[in-house]
Structures are given as structure tokens and as C-alpha cells.
Image: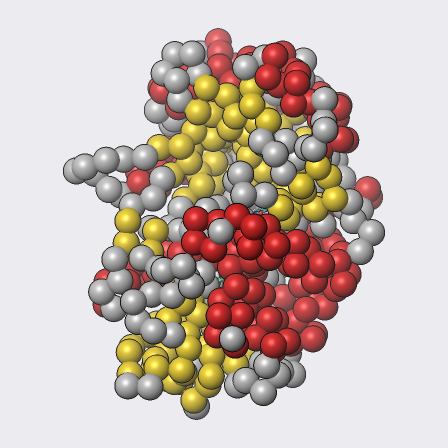
Amino acid sequence: MFYDVIIIGAGPGGIFSAYELVKKNPDLKIAVIEAGHPLDKRKCPIDGDKVKSCINCKTCAIMHGFGGAGAFSDGKYNITNDFGGTLYEFIGKKKALELMHYVDEINMSHGGEGTKLYSTAGSGVKKVCVQNQLNLLDASVRHLGTDKNYIVLGNIYDELKDKVSFFFNDKAEKIEKTDDGFRVIHQKGDDACKNCIVSVGRSGSKWMESVCSELNIETKSNRVDIGVRVELPAVVFSHLTDELYESKIVYRTKNYEDLVRTFCMNPKGRVVNENTNGIVTVNGHSYEDPQFQTDNTNFALLVSKHFSEPFKDSNGYGESVARLSNMLGGGVMVQRFGDLVRGRRSNEKRIEEGTVVPTLAATPGDLSLVLPKRILDGIIEMIYALDKIAPGTANDDTLLYGVEVKFYNMQVDIDNNLETAHKGLYIIGDGSGVTHSLSHASASGVYVARQITE
Ligand SMILES: Cc1cc2nc3c(=O)[nH]c(=O)nc-3n(C[C@H](O)[C@H](O)[C@H](O)COP(=O)(O)OP(=O)(O)OC[C@H]3O[C@@H](n4cnc5c(N)ncnc54)[C@H](O)[C@@H]3O)c2cc1C
């Protein structure tokens, strides 16, 4: 079959490409090839009862399928150029923000209406942070919540399903350059297209590397973020989360002058496993609907690691740290902050006696045996710094889950159209190494769709 456009990957990048292509030119022949299940078939077997932790499914329902890694996420669309990716370096700050707002409008018109848009503008929290050597980054945050995010995705799929050919449970294996475009070899067939949009996210990072090597597309090593997920009573952070929902706070450590930052804050949320290429790390999300909310808030504390010559494999380094925690804990490990600073492991009894009820069944252990000293020192210092603006953060019973690793794809050589040196081959979203968030990945999808149709 010959298509005008083949999109590989049905995460936010791929979905918004398809949406905008259809909107701008309904006559285009479009296919979407997705390794995972359709949205309604995506189900993680962890139920907290019979299946307590990750069983390494062949296709991880959290990471793959319609909606991509974002399908069961907290649905926090951060409208900002300050974090979430560097799309603005390619398309300009104004355009990037404009597209993020456009994506927000589409989400609102597909079931997201009524959800709150939070903003740091004019917030008193900024001053309190500065007074305590913490830097609150500027952003507007639309919180759809895991439940509403699912509804929005379902509505967008319903709108697209008759206009776009979707291939699910179908992994793209190879892209070949042809005289009039590209040939995409996938598990269920072999199709050709004039334009190919690759949007395979973090889970497609290894495949992306092989595509780049076969098509001689240059790549650059990216950073890796390593840290823990903190879980504490929601009241400790409620003065921040009620006003801002998510606060991205950065701290420069006194010891090493490393930057430690909060990431992915989930008020009244749950801590969850994340499986990337067989390595189990930790993440978090929360629901909009109060009946699914918990008494805890969780967020990550991360330290970025860049490597220079001769070592380039930052993801490999992150994987090794995560493997260590998987080896010692059989998956994700949990430790009370009090145990960590006293230099002892946590055990079932101490966790049970604690005042914070864990929302993820993880193995009590000792994170100091997993995390490099410099990273751990930075995290501990940041917890004490946060304790000044949110007293209770450094309580003994605060839970730390490890490890949380944010893998970034190799940065792929693309131009300002997000196009490779092969005309008609676009690489977008987290798979390009340029974006790291729902809003930036989605905006990159809209952007290439417009490049193609214009
Ligand atoms: C638990 C969790 C919570 C998160 N919460 C948030 C949040 O609240 N806010 C936020 O901004 N970001 C969040 N993120 C990150 C966010 O989900 C990603 O930044 C975003 O989904 C990236 O979109 P994408 O389209 O680039 O890639 P993805 O969403 O990763 O989608 C890529 C798709 O490509 C498919 N694929 C991969 N390889 C192939 C192949 N060879 N052939 C066919 N298909 C392939 C995958 O199955 C996947 O469905 C979260 C991530 C996780 C895991």
C-alpha cells in the first residue's frame, strides 16, 4: 500500500500529527503503526492484590499502545518553554507556546473541558522559594488527570479511526529510503509512503538508534536524570499543590553545586512502576476524580548526569543504576527517609509502623546501596531545603522509592522543520531527544503535520 504519510508510534506526538493532518487535508491517505494495543485493550496486570509488582509483560501496557507513555499518566500538560523539552530551539519560543495552547484547546474540546489550568504567574510561592535558595520555574499547567486524559484520548481516537488506518500490535522493524519516499517494514506488512513521521518515544529509543545508524542520521548523547520518588502526606505540600498543582523547583547543592529538581508532582496520587526495556523504575500519577485520590502526594527528585568523552552512553549508566535496584529489591525499592539518614535499611515492620501508607508495594531496602553517593547527597540536601518551604518533607516517615530514572533518547540530527537530511523523514516527540513531555511531544506532532500539508 502507498500512503501519503506513515506515522510510526501512536503516542501524543503521533496522535497529534494524525489529528492535524486529517484536519488540514482530509484527503490524505494516512497510516499509523503502533507496537502496543488499542486504548481499550491496554491493561497493566498489577492489581495490588494478585499481582503486586511488574511481571515484565511482552508489551508493557503502561508504555505502549494508543496514547503512548502518556495514556495512564497524570495528564499534566505543562505549557512552558522552561522545561519539558527544547522544541523552542527548533521552532522558536513563540511558535512552541502557540502550539502548546492549540493542543490544550483540542484536549478541551475532546472531553477535557472543566479541568483546571494552574499558573505560577503572580504566585507568592516564588518569593518563599527564593528566600530559601530554591528556584520555582514558570509554567501554566493543565491537569487532566489520569481519568480525563483517558477520555480525551478515547474521543480523539473515535474521531480519527475512520479517517486513518491504524495498525496495532504491529512493530515497525525497518525504514528504507526509496526513490519516491520510504518503505516501512513492519510485523504485519510492508508499506510505502511519501512522508514518514517517526514518533516512537522513550520506549522506542533502541529501535530509533538502529534506524539512525542504518540511514546515516547523526545522533548526539543526551543526559540521564537519576533520583528517587518521594511520597508524603498530601497536607505537607497542599499549600503549593492547591495553588500551583505542580511546582517545578530547582535547588543548587552546596556540596557539589549540582542541580536537583522536583519533577512530576502528583497531589493525592499514586506511585507506580514503569518498565522501560525490561528495567523497572518508578513513576507517579493521580486522578482528577476525588474518589480515586489518596492521602499522599508524590514527586520525583532528580539529578541530571551528562557525560563527556570518552563515555557517551548516559542511558546505559542510568540502566545500570536501575538494574542494581532491581537486583537488590526484585523491582522498585522503598526506604523511609529516617532510615536512610541513619544509615540503615528499611524493613516491612518499620514501613508498616510509619505514618505514610505506601501506595506502591515495593521492597523495603537501602537506597544508599544503589544510588551513587554524589546523587544521594544531593537528594538528601534537597529534602532538607524543601523542608523549609514545606515543613514535614524531611520527616522520618517520608518514603523514598528508587530508582526513578528519566532516560532521554539520543538527540537526533533534525533541522528546524524537525526533518532529517532525508527529505520527508521527520523525527518528533521524545524519540527525537528534543521533547520530554506531553505538551512538547504533542506540539511537535502538530508542527510537522503543518509542514507536510503546507
Ligand atoms: C507513568 C508516566 C507518567 C507521565 N506523566 C506525565 C505527565 O503528567 N506530564 C507530562 O508532560 N509527561 C508525562 N510523562 C511523559 C510523557 O508521557 C511523554 O513525554 C510523552 O508520552 C511522549 O510522547 P511521544 O509521542 O513522543 O512518545 P510515547 O508517548 O512514548 O509514544 C511512543 C509510542 O510509539 C510506540 N512505538 C515504539 N517503538 C515502536 C516501533 N518500533 N513500532 C511501532 N510503534 C512503536 C510505543 O508503543 C508508544 O506507544 C509520563 C510518562 C509516564 C511513563
Tell me what residue is drawn at x 48 percent, y 70 percent: 451
Residue 313 placed where, x, y %? 27, 43
- Quarter of the view holding residue 1: bottom left
Residue 255 placed where, x, y %? 39, 12
**In the rendered view, how is the structure colored?**
secondary structure
Count of numbered marks: 0
In this picture, residue 204 sits left or right of residue 401: left
In this picture, residue 284 sits left or right of residue 4: right
Residue 243 placed where, x, y %? 76, 31
Give the camera-side residue of 305 and 117.
117
- Quarter of the view holding residue 317: top left
Can the viewer see residue 224? yes
In this picture, residue 269 sits left or right of residue 135: right
The correct choice, above or below, for 338 with respect to 453 in the image is above
Residue 355 placed where, x, y %? 69, 19
Q: Which residue lies furthest to the top in this view?
A: 342
Tell me what residue is drawn at x 56 percent, y 58 percent: 442
Give the camera-side residue of 346 and 261.
261
The correct choice, above or below, for 442 with respect to 178 in the image is above
The correct choice, above or below, for 279 with respect to 44 in the image is above
Q: Which residue lies furthest to the left in this view?
A: 310
Tell me what residue is drawn at x 44 percent, y 24 percent: 259
Tell me what residue is drawn at x 55 percent, y 30 percent: 262
Can the viewer see residue 204? no
